[in-house]
Structure formats: structure tokens, C-alpha cells
Amino acid sequence: MDSRILGKRQNIFLLLFLLGRISGAKMLSLNGLPATGNVTENSSAYVLVHTFSVTLSPSPSEVASGYPLIINSNPLTKAFRIDPGATHTYKVVTTGDPILDYETMPNSFDLQIYVSDTAGASDLQILTVQITDVNEPPVFRGNLANQTVMIYILEGNRTPPGVIYQIDASDPEQSQLTYSCTPVSQSFTVSQTGTISSTKEFDFERDPHPYLLNITVTDRLGLSTTRAVIVNIINTNDEMPYFTTKERLYRIPEEKSPGTVVANITAKDPDDEGIISRLVYSISPPNMHFAINPFTGVIYVAMRIDRDAAPLHLHPNISLVIHVEDSPSGGQTNEIEITVIIEDLNDNPPECSLYNFRLEVSETATTGTVFLDLRDHCQDIDVEPPNNEFKFTGLTGLGSNKFTLNPSGSGKIVLIGDLDFENPDNLAVEEYTLTAVVQDIAQPYYTNNIYIYIKIIPVNEFFPGFNNPSYVFNVSEVTRGGSSIGKVSATDKDLPFTGITYSIVAGGGTLSYTNIFWIDPNEGNLEIIATLDYETTQKYILTVQASDAEKLATVSVTINVLEVNDEKPVCSANTYSLAIPVDLAVGTNIEGFKIVCVDRDSSPRSFRYFINSGNVNNHFTFSPSAGSNISQLILASRFDYDSGLDRIWDYRLRIYITDDNLLSSSNRATALIETGTVTLSIKVIPNPTTTITTTPAITILIRTENVYSESAWYVPFLISVGSMLLLGYLSFLLAKYIRTYCPPKPKANKRPLKTTPEKKKVKKEEVWEMTKINTVFDGKATDPVTGKMYEYNSKSGARRWKDTKETVEPGIKDPVAQVISTAPANSSEGKDRMGTPSKQEASPNGRELAAKNNMATKPSERKAETSSQDSLKLQKPKDGAGGTGSSSPGRSPVPSPKIYPQLQPKPALKNVV
């Protein structure tokens, strides 16, 4: 999209330049252009390509801001720009974006450089930039292009000598490349095709582990590039590890915590001498009680060991087979077996199915109620008494004064106190936390704690109640929506307090608004959400409900709307136009005009009328000016245009009507006053003899100038293209209309009557069509050339000399008019649009030849013609041509012969005597 916009702008620049040339603008020239500049490929930014200067016209002008500039390039590129140099000197430099590349980019660019000065002159020249090729070093491709390549080789016969890597390199100039390796190694070779090969089998323990190869690729001119290749020798596993731990028997008491170390088994691998061991340890098969660290060989307790559980209570010895491997995947292995003896202890405390109990008790529960028996949930898994016997002691915690173990040690939780929330002695505690201890009777007296959480459920016993039996609020009718007008409040004796929700369940609506008031459901604040109007409703009675989610209470809320003067006077003639004569008598009600005003919240006696603006020289007033809702427009003083006191003939009065007439002067400063407005247009009609004095006026001319904006370049472009398309379409319609309704005049056949050589490819024949007409020489005339008398037929135009009886026009023999067609027999040429034959002028030679041919016609042929024939058609001889007779130029005007074959009688052909 940007390239298309740039191209369009460049076309506009070129069009402006050509228009400037055509219009004869002052000359402005680019010196040093056109020219050719050279720049090498891979040039960085700001490299000089060409220098040129600008010669200004003699007028005091300067180069326009932003010029000269490159308006176009072929091919399109952003690789060049123009930087200013000395005065009126400029440099074409590279931009560095993109980098010029001889091999991948065009080698030549044509830059169109355009310059314009402040006087409107401009010039456009072309700079041709040639890209020069330079030799570039070879480049590596693939992995070696931008990194060091790591190659790994297994030691021994697993990697025989051979190719280990293929180098991929190229030269921008397609030059032949050579490869070399430094330092020279006996273990590796590099071929001239870039193949790296090993020459031997490697031993990890004897040979260097890594080899560094510097691979250099060189072109035919000596430029080279070097990259590093590192060859790593990988050690292989071929030795079995051995154990270094000698002990095979270990003891551990039962009930040791997981993670307790039992033994540390160690081993070594001959293949890993001098480096960190990679040995992996495991227990085979795995044992549920013990685990081994796979990297260190440490054996530790994996889970709780119970001596009294099966099968250890009969067989306390555990055998473990330790397996070591020097590779996680199929390496060398070794094994040893050790024995662990589990020592017996009294380690089983009483156990319960739950150690956390949660109970819910109503606040109205009675004393003596048993809520829980702990013994139903506990047991001791020891095999022999007294290890499997236990008791419950130590019921402590918050609520130990409300609950107890009864009987002692039995595990039964019994209520012994009052749980009522409304009782001040209970401090409204919602949850009690008790701790009981289950203890083993035998040594070492193992114990477990049992936690009991007793939640007291409150009971809704009381109804909410409002603080007042009813509420009354007064609010002004102009109070804005969202304003608070009061608050209702209710309380609930139930504890803990769960909150009260307020809502309006009745009242507070009108025909226009369903809800005018809103109450905060949590706080009880009443707010207005619609407009109040005293004139519509003066009082609202609401029913507000308070709810604690189960029980309800309601209260009546009365809202009194206070009246405020908030209505403007509204007058029936808000805008009016009047016309009065210049000599109207003072005190006259102008055209009977009067203002009738109403105010919804004010008395008719509260109105005051005054003209705020437009009453020049105070010619107008209202009567009465206050105390009534009806007032008349009165002429207060005469007009005086003769002395120049009055100059205005059109008055525009702005009248203010206020509703403060009944207020005292002191109250008007603080009271809310509303104002209505009326606009009157009054035209003073002068007497016929009155000279209208015109007041000098200031004429404000607003000039709108369309300024071209570069961002709107497409507007003139679209207008121009659209205009050309419209003009072309209208021209097409006009041509079509003319061709349809104004057909062109048939063209006369101007082919010569001389016999031309017959063409072989196109066979043409000429046909004589002779129509018989009646010849009567009914007129005489004198030939202005010869002075001889001749006779003529006024209808056909046939003529003959009076003395010799020879026809003047030899081309017309007898009474026959000849129409000659030079078109082929199957062509429609030579006829007009109506199908009638076109007229042809015959030369004298043609007419004579026609006469001879006519005289040579045999009588038998003439007799063969019948009167019913419309015409005779004879093939033209090859050596002659026929023609129709016409008046010769310069002779006396004689009616031209007209041929109407369908109207003339057609007798048999005969010679004219």
C-alpha cells in the first residue's frame, strides 16, 4: 500500500513539473545532472554516490523546503537519499537500508531527482547509479555458518576410520574453493571437496579427549574464512564395577522415621578412574521398608516399620540384594546381599479413625445431652495387653466449662452449661474448641490428641423492629436525583447480628415513574432517583420493610414535597414579526399585539415585563409593565429620521418576563426567580416621501480558500479520473445518438469511368440500367459557349442541337437515362439508403462510347424488348464506359434530368432521330 501511495505521489510530482515547464515558469536547473554515479556493493550508510548543485532563477527565490528529493527510482528502492552540502550543493549518499549487493540486487538504479524553488520554478533530472562488484570472502553454510561444530566419536572399533563431517561452503562470485586444516593433524584429513575424515581408531584412556580443527576455505583470489570444528572422543564401558563395603549384617529398631540411614554401600568402576563415578545402585527386588540412593548407595528407611504387624511379628529379619550398574542402559553390573534385623519396641499408641471432630449444636440445646462418644472411633493395634488398652483424659480448651467427659475416662462428651447467644454470660461465642487425649495404659504411655470443634447454631427468635413508629421527611421539588433525603433504622435482638435488609414494598410511584425513591438495602438511606414536581404530587407515602431473612417488619414513611419557584413564564407569542408606519401616533397599541403568559407556580400578578435589548431610543414599551399576565406593546415615542436621531428601520426586541413582581427589593436578591423570553421583529414602514437614512455598516467578507493538503492527494486525482471517464462516456452517447438519428450523407461514387486493367483476384462487372422515358423537346435555349441553338426536354433534361438533330449529351441516347454501377454485382455500393441508384458524372469520351454502342444495337434486339420490362441490363464492353448525361458547366441553366423509372412509361427501345 505504501509503495502504491509513493508511486501516485511521484506521478503528481512529475505532472506538476511538466505543468511548470509548459506554463513558462522561471527556469531552475540541476547542475551535474543527468549523470552516472558508481558505488561499490556492501557500502555502509552515508557513502557518497554523486554531487550536484542547484542554479536558481534570477528572481530572489530559494530552494523550497524539503527539496531536492528523489521522487522515483527504477527499480524502486530506498537505498539512496539526498543530503545537503555547501550552499545549493547536494550529495546523493547511501542509506544502508537495504545493503547493496551486486549478486542479489539490480546492478543499476535510475533515480529521478526533482527540485522546486519558492518562485514556483522546478527541474527534474535522472541520476544513474551503477553498483560495482567487489570480491567477497567465501561463506560457510549449514551448522558452520554461525557456530562451532561439535563432533562426537566413540572410542575403539565402534567408530572405524572414515568420513566424519562434510563441510558446506560457497563463494558469492562462484569461484572455486580450496579447504585446509590447522594445525596439521595425523588423526584427521580434509579433502579438496570439504570432507573431514578420521585416520585411525581412538582410545579414550591414551588419546586426547577433544581435538580442535581450524577449517579454512579459500577462494581463487586468496580471500578465506575459518571456522572451528571440535572432535570429542567418547569413553565406552568395558569393565565390571566391584563393591568396597565389607559388612553384610545391620540392626535397626522398629518405628524409625523414614529417611533414617541403615547402611552405606560403596563400589568402584575401573572405567571411571580419576572422574566422578557414574555407578547406579538399586535393591533387587525392591523392598517396601527400605530404599537406596541410586547415586550414593545409602540405604535408608522408606516407610514406618511395625514389628507387631505381619509378617515381621514372626520373621523380624529382612534380606536385601544390592545391585550396582555402571550404565543406566545395559552396562556392566555386580550384586551383594545384606541382612537387616528389626528390633522389637512398644511403639503402638491408641489410634482413632478421626482426630478432628466437627459438631453442630443448637443454642437452645438442654444440659445433660450426650453429643459424642470417642471410644467408638478409637482402638489400639498392639497384639498383647496391656499394650492394646487406652483411656481418655484432659478435656481442655474453650468450652471446657460447657462440656465434660462423663464418666471420667469414658470418652463421652456431655453438655453441662447454657449455650444461648442472648445470655450476656456466654459472650456470644459461636464455636468451642476442645482437646481430648487418648493415652496408652502401658509404658511408654503413647498418646494422641483428639480435637473437637463444636459450632453453636443460632436460632432466629425475635422480629426486627424500627427505631421510630413512622418517619416524615421534607424535600424540595428541585432536589437533584441521587440526593439523600433521610434514613430509616431497625434493630434485631437476635445474636449474633446477621444484618437487616431494607426495601420499599409500596408507594413512591407515579404514572410517569414506577419508582421515584430508592433505599440502600444495607444502610436504610432513602434517595431520589427521579424528578419531583410539586405541581403534580405534593406528598408520597412509602411502606419500608426490614427483613432479617426470616422475619419481617414494616414502617410508614411520609415524604412531603416542598414547593419552589422552578417554572419559567411561558408566553403564547414567543417570536413575532410586526410592521408599523413611521408616523404612528404615540400610545398606540402596535398592530393590537399583546403578550399572554402563564406560570405553573406563580400568580398572574407576579409578572414583570421589560425590554432587555434592541429598544434603540426607547420607542417601545409594554403596558401594563407588571402585575398582569397580559401586556400590550405600545409606541412610547415618535420616530425622528429627518434629524438623524433615528437611523434604524428594523428593530429586534428581546423581552424578558420575570415572576418576581410580588417580591420586595430585598427578597429579589436571594429568591429563586425564573425568566421567560419573547423575541419581536418590528419593521418601520417609511412614508413615500421619506428619505431613508442609511447607517454606514461594516460588511464582513468571509473568504474560504481551498488549500491542497498532501494527505488528500487522492482527491484531485479521483476528481480528474472521474471527469475523464464521465466525458468519455458522454462522448460515446453523443456519437451513438448522432449515428442513430443523423445518418451520414451518401458519398458520390468518384470512381473514374475509364477502363482499368482487370484484376485477377476480384472480378467486377459494370451494369447499365436503361429506363425508357418519353422524350419531347419542349424548350429551346442558346449554348453560351458555341452560340448554337439547342432543344431540351424540361422533364428529362435531354438536349439536342436544333439544326443537326444531334443530341447535346451523347451519353443519353434515345429517351434512356443510364445509371452506372462500378461495384460488383453482389455489392450494395453505389446505392443510397433508400435503395435508389447513385448518380455518376460521365466524361465526354464515355458519353460518345455509349452513343456508339447504342447506335450499334440490332433492331431485332430492340424489338425483343417488351413494354412490361422495368429496365434493361447489358454487360459493359471492356474498352468503354457509360455515363448519365448532365449539364456542362458554364451553359445556361437547364433542369437536370431526374430519373424516375417506376413513374415513366416503358415502351420498346428505339433510336432517336
Image (cartoon, rainbow, N blue to C red):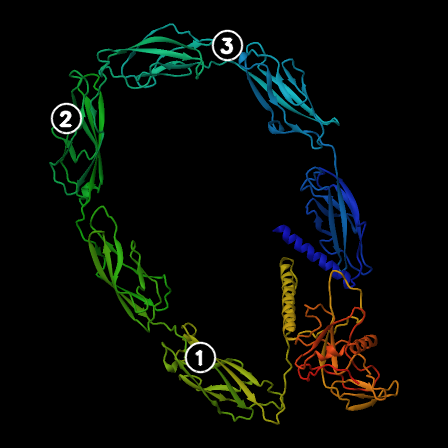
SS class, disc 2 = loop
Residue 138's label in the rendered image is none
- Closer to the chain start, of discs 1 and 3, is 3
Q: Nearer the viewer, residue 569 or 119?
A: 119
Residue most extreme to the front: 860
- Per the model, the C-alpha gap separating discs 1 and 2 is 98 Å
Q: Nearer the viewer, residue 605 or 728?
A: 728
- Residue 477 figure quarter: bottom left
Residue 657's label in the rendered image is 1
The amino acid pointed to by label 2 is Gly
Q: Is residue 372 left or right of residue 880?
A: left
Which residue in the structure is indicated by mark 2? Answer: 409
- Closer to the chain start, of discs 1 and 2, is 2
Q: Is residue 593 visible?
A: yes
For the point 51% across and 92% down, the residue is 586
Residue 273's label in the rendered image is 3
Q: Position of residue 748 (x, y in %)?
A: 74, 74
Q: Nearer the viewer, residue 740 or 909?
A: 909
Quarter of the image with the C terminus in it:
bottom right
Q: Position of residue 198 (x, y in %)?
A: 61, 16
Q: Position of residue 470 (x, y in %)?
A: 23, 62
- Per the model, the C-alpha gap separating discs 2 and 3 is 67 Å
- Per the model, the C-alpha gap separating discs 1 and 3 is 115 Å
For the point 67% across and 82% down, the residue is 867
Query: How dense is the environment of label 3, judged by Cα within 10 Å: few (below 14), some, or many (20 and up)?
Result: few
SS class, disc 1 = strand
- Closer to the chain start, of discs 2 and 3, is 3
The amino acid pointed to by label 3 is Glu
